[in-house]
């Protein structure tokens, strides 16, 4: 399907945009504990689904809860990208060192758990300097509109100020036949590191 | 008076041909903390047809018709289709299910409280999303449902401005994906084997 924002020729970011990006990035990097409540729709080929998604991040520990229609098929996951506890709606629990692989086995969906905590906030997995200048586009307030990172195409929309952070409320991620859309209903940013 | 016996409840539930109402839904975790509140409206026709629309906090439509459940997410521009049976254990099946409710659940009459007569329903099938469902009925019919899941989280749904057995516009139960919406086949919800 056509990408969210269309892809006009991406001239490299201006100095003003890069300067704006610097302060925007610094504020996001100071976020240590945060959470969001929203919905995610995934598609892999012709199959897919949509879930209610509650994501909580405390430092490097991610806790997320997924639920299907009418709160059926609840799945809770907590831990880091290389060690997670999964609990399903029936109370079955399982610990894994490969949560991405297990999730893909269970649902058929490839979810980039290790990089999503940064991507979902509008941060590249490493830094903008690590990307080629034609691999990202900034808006005029220096926030990421789209970029290609670790083989994923990521696009943002509906940035809004939450406290002193500008956060996206719509993210689309694409990789091979996999497409994930996340619509954030509410961000909770606590205070972030002062 | 509200149903006071299991038979009276079964009869009252099977007497519902159509029901339209507004609903408020509240989910609390095991510690009783409210985790999510949502509201919307629905219309259903037994057996097996419903149009359930969440309006807040975000719009989501769940439409069931001839054995298919559609989940439409306008904000995510996606609609997924799955067999309705996948929600067999879901509480909506109490209202729209084909099978008599006492076949699907073991039912006990509790007591009357807050003007409602309460019943406890335990699924006869072992594996299910919900450990127990509590139904509160008044003289007109079902007024409140509470589902307790295996992790002791409770979802409470309260119905208002209920209209029982009124004529219903059939087209509500037909879903056409609007332009630009991706249609996908839904897989079984994730569960750990």
Image (cartoon, rainbow, N blue to C red):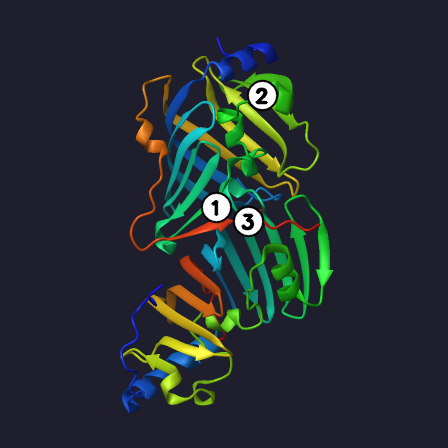
Of all chains, the one bearing label 3 is B
- Residue A38, by quadrant, is bottom left
3 and 2 marks in contact (CB < 8 Å): no
Observer-nearest of B113 and A94: A94
Report the residue at 47% width, 37% height from top.
Answer: B68
Name the front one of labels 3 and 1. 3
| B9 in relation to B52, above or below | above
Q: Position of residue B73 (x, y in %)?
A: 39, 49
**Between marks 3 and 2, how big is the CA–CA gap?**
27 Å
Name the front one of labels 3 and 2. 3
Report the residue at 33% width, 42% height from top.
Answer: B176
Q: How many marks?
A: 3
Report the residue at 38% width, 81% height from top.
Answer: A136
Quarter containing the N terminus of chain A: bottom left
**Between marks 1 and 2, how big is the CA–CA gap?**
28 Å
Q: Position of residue A150 (x, y in %)?
A: 51, 79
- Residue A107, by quadrant, is bottom right
State the SS at label 2. helix
Disc 3 target residue: B187
Disc 2 target residue: B101
Of all chains, the one bearing label 2 is B
Disc 1 target residue: B36
3 and 1 marks in contact (CB < 8 Å): no
| A122 in relation to B101, above or below | below
State the SS at label 3. loop
């Amino acid at each position: 399907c056509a990408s969210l924002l269309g892809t006009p020729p991406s001239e490299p970011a201006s100095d003003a945009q890069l300067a704006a990006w610097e302060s925007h990035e610094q504020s996001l990097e100071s976020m240590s504990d945060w959470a969001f409540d929203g919905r995610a729709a995934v598609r892999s080929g012709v199959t897919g689904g949509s879930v209610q998604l509650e994501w909580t991040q405390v430092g490097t520990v991610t806790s997320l809860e997924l639920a299907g229609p009418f709160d059926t098929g609840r799945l809770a996951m907590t831990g880091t990208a290389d060690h997670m506890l999964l609990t399903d709606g029936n109370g079955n629990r399982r610990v894994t060192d490969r949560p991405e692989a297990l999730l893909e086995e269970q649902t058929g969906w490839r979810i980039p758990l290790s990089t999503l905590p940064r991507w979902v906030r509008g941060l590249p997995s490493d830094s903008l300097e690590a990307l080629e200048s034609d691999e990202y586009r900034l808006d005029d307030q220096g926030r990421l509109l789209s970029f290609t990172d670790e083989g994923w195409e990521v696009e943002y929309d509906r940035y809004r100020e939450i406290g002193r952070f500008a956060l996206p409320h719509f993210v689309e991620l694409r990789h091979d036949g996999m497409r994930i859309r996340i619509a954030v209903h509410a961000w909770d940013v606590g205070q972030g590191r002062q | 008076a509200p149903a006071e016996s299991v038979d009276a409840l079964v009869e009252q539930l099977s007497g519902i041909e159509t029901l339209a109402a507004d609903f408020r839904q509240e989910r609390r975790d095991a510690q009783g903390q409210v985790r999510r509140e949502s509201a919307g409206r629905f219309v259903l026709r037994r057996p097996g047809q419903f149009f359930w629309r969440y309006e807040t906090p975000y719009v989501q439509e769940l439409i069931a018709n001839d054995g298919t459940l559609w989940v439409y997410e306008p904000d995510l521009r996606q609609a997924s289709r799955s067999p309705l049976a996948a929600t067999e254990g879901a509480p909506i099946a109490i209202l729209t299910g084909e099978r008599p409710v006492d076949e699907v659940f073991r039912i006990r009459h509790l007591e009357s409280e807050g003007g409602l007569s309460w019943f406890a329903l335990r699924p006869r099938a072992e594996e299910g999303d919900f450990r127990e469902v509590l139904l509160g009925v008044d003289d007109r019919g079902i007024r409140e449902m509470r589902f307790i899941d295996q992790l002791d989280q409770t979802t409470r749904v309260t119905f208002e401005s209920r209209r029982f057995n009124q004529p219903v516009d059939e087209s509500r139960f037909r879903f056409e994906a609007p332009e630009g919406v991706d249609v996908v086949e839904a897989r079984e919800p994730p569960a750990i084997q």
